[in-house]
Amino acid sequence: MKGQNRTKGSITMAELAKICGYSKATVSRALSDDPRVKPETKALILEMARRYNYRPHTVASNLARRRTKTIGLMFPSAPRTIADPFFLEYLHGVSETLFEQGFSLLIPQVRQQRVTETIEELVAHRRVDGIILTEPRLEDERIVLLQESNVPFVFLGSTVKEDVSWVDGDNRGGICQGVRALGALGHRRIAVILGEEGLVSTEKRFLGYQDGLAALGLKLDRDLVWPGDFTRQGGYRAVVNHLDQIKAGDVTAIMACNDLMAIGAIQALNEAGVKVPEQVSVMGFDGIEVGKYLSPPLTTVQQPVYSLGREVARVLLGLIAEEHGTVHLTLPVTIVNETNTIGPASPRGAA
Amino acid sequence: MKGQNRTKGSITMAELAKICGYSKATVSRALSDDPRVKPETKALILEMARRYNYRPHTVASNLARRRTKTIGLMFPSAPRTIADPFFLEYLHGVSETLFEQGFSLLIPQVRQQRVTETIEELVAHRRVDGIILTEPRLEDERIVLLQESNVPFVFLGSTVKEDVSWVDGDNRGGICQGVRALGALGHRRIAVILGEEGLVSTEKRFLGYQDGLAALGLKLDRDLVWPGDFTRQGGYRAVVNHLDQIKAGDVTAIMACNDLMAIGAIQALNEAGVKVPEQVSVMGFDGIEVGKYLSPPLTTVQQPVYSLGREVARVLLGLIAEEHGTVHLTLPVTIVNETNTIGPASPRGAA
DNA sequence: CTGAAAGCGCTAACAA
DNA sequence: TTGTTAGCGCTTTCAG
């Protein structure tokens, strides 16, 4: 009657214990490599487990240990989507680390404006052991909710609040580097396409832009600050809206705050008959795979996207295991494909 | 002592039962909307549950019900990766449907050549309630393993075996459509870049190519059949290896069996100074987002990638709930961006 | 070093 | 219509 409709080829711990002539407790200890069990006993149990193809029952184990072994992963909300290439590469890193440690991923579908409820749902009765989030905002309501809940969480992207763990690429330094590289090619009229408003990353990248200008001895010109939203369409629109300026030679280079916008910008320039990089240089930020699909490949500030994913997961796991407290981790960035979509400022650039 | 270190704002069913003055059993029934409980009782319990912010404990419930509420998702193995854009969009659809039904996703990291062990691991003690797989092969060892295990499973992509559930885009019809569209533009020398060998989809798409040729009254020319592997690099190499042929005007159009290869092909053509679509037309298959990032956007056969994900999940859930038996679902495809990377055959095309 | 026993929080016969 | 009673399979005191 017992153990009848179970998956074939698999026995329970109780059965294994009987076979070995030990109690469940000892078997449990042996399997978790508890030093208290005698080596010979452990060896015997392990051997029997192998022989009888014993497999631990994860769910039962989780119940007994008050954990779920699953991590909630929140994706960015509109206008960005899960299909954003950046997040795919990032997910790759996250999932790999997580699965190495036996965790599953719960990816809730976040309905517009229901972010807090989604988090509450996740947090209730610890449906997840921890949560990974992206895109911290300057004022982020999620943070207080999460802190109250006592569920460990980590952001991809630095937060304003100090007592929150995050992992991020060097936004400010990276954009600054990019602007300086453009300056080194003789550019003096460098426009920037900003990211979505209200995000910390947008702010940081804008600061990086200003740092870059300062390093070049240039002053901030509001006409060169174009709004954007981190989408390809946003980059496209930014260029279209400033086509006159571009055609007048008032702008010789564009620093886009992410690759998707750089790609959109290049499309708009192509369509307007403006040659990249001969007439206008374009530099992106992120270093996503698809930048390489363009001809020529996109010149961009490469973030270690995959590593960001791995690190975020690693930090969260550390938090869950209580191996450490709050962590802030900034990963370095580098310019790649240096001579593709950027080039020397054209003579008329001084227009 | 009891119920002390639980997530605040959440009580157990036992506590709720005490509050209501009923037994756990009745509460459990009320919460699962069992018709056997008196309406007033049910109302009271529901009200109290709301008031005390009761949240069911998923793990415990799963243990008692002998299920896990998690689905194993197998990703394609090398040379494709989880970072393949096609799979991200697909994952979006899968995860959304699954989460709506309260399922989590377990994405095991599959070590090379360890596919069968990974499946065994998943299946053991029903670590998952069902499994989603991709890229069925002509001879697929996973299928027999899965069938023996009794765990419900679905493939993204049609299988050779009849008694296996799958969801797929119309591969054969789609490629055929693509070839005919090229033919309608006057192309007679249409090369095809094939997918990875051994896959059912590669086979089907090749058949679609042949159908297309037949419809155009052309016969299969082995010189126009180029091997590939579904990666961008594969598409690039295919073109590089046949550059002489292309430059000689012996090929005026290329049908790539997926978008990534089309993108690689275009890069190779660009680098060789061959104009797309003026000198050579290129058509892809899949309709991934990144195709739109090219200038001009890639002409391609659009699969409903997101819907494929949703349908795969829906079918699997149906199988798990035993609502239906084996299902074969083919979703329609359409050509998009019809006048971008394809154009009329150039006069010298008859070379 | 090992075992007995008491749960983890919920579900599901079986009775009443 | 409701309650009682056993578990689900594993972990973990607490004793010995």
Image: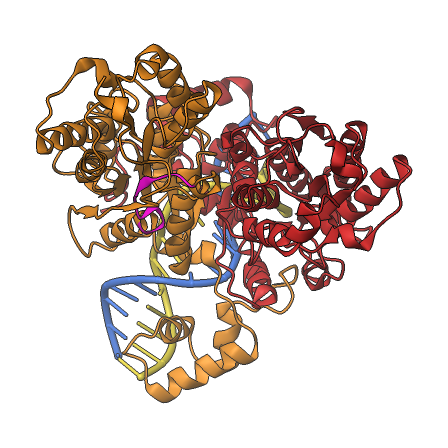
Chain colours: A orange, B red, C yellow, D blue
User: How many discs appear?
Assistant: 0
Left/right of residue A166 with respect to residue B112 in the rendered view: left
Query: Which image quarter: residue A215?
Result: top left
Query: Which image quarter: residue A80?
Result: top left
Q: Residue at x 69, y 28 (%)?
A: B343
Q: Which residues are magenta?
A: A297-307
Q: Nearer the viewer, residue A118 or B257?
A: B257
Q: Is residue A247 visible?
A: yes
Q: Residue at x 29, y 47 (%)?
A: A312
Left/right of residue B303 with respect to residue B45 in the rendered view: right
Quarter holding the C terminus of chain B? Answer: top right
Q: Residue at x 33, y 52 (%)?
A: A310
Query: Percent position (x, y) of residue B264?
Result: 56, 46
Left/right of residue B344 with respect to residue B272 in the rendered view: right
Measured along the vertical axis of the image, is residue A149 above or below residue A92? above
Left/right of residue A42 with respect to residue B85 in the rendered view: left
- Magenta stretch containing residue A56, yes or no? no
Query: Percent position (x, y) of residue B250?
Result: 75, 46
Residue furthest toward the bottom?
A40
Q: Residue at x 68, y 38 (%)?
A: B315
Query: Percent position (x, y) of residue B27?
Result: 47, 32
Query: Which image quarter: residue B323?
Result: top right
Query: Percent position (x, y) of residue A97?
Result: 37, 55
Measured along the vertical axis of the image, is residue A186 above or below residue A4? above
Q: Nearer the viewer, residue C10 or B39?
A: C10
Measured along the vertical axis of the image, is residue B125 above or below residue B70? below
- Magenta stretch containing residue A301, yes or no? yes
Q: Is residue A78 visible?
A: no
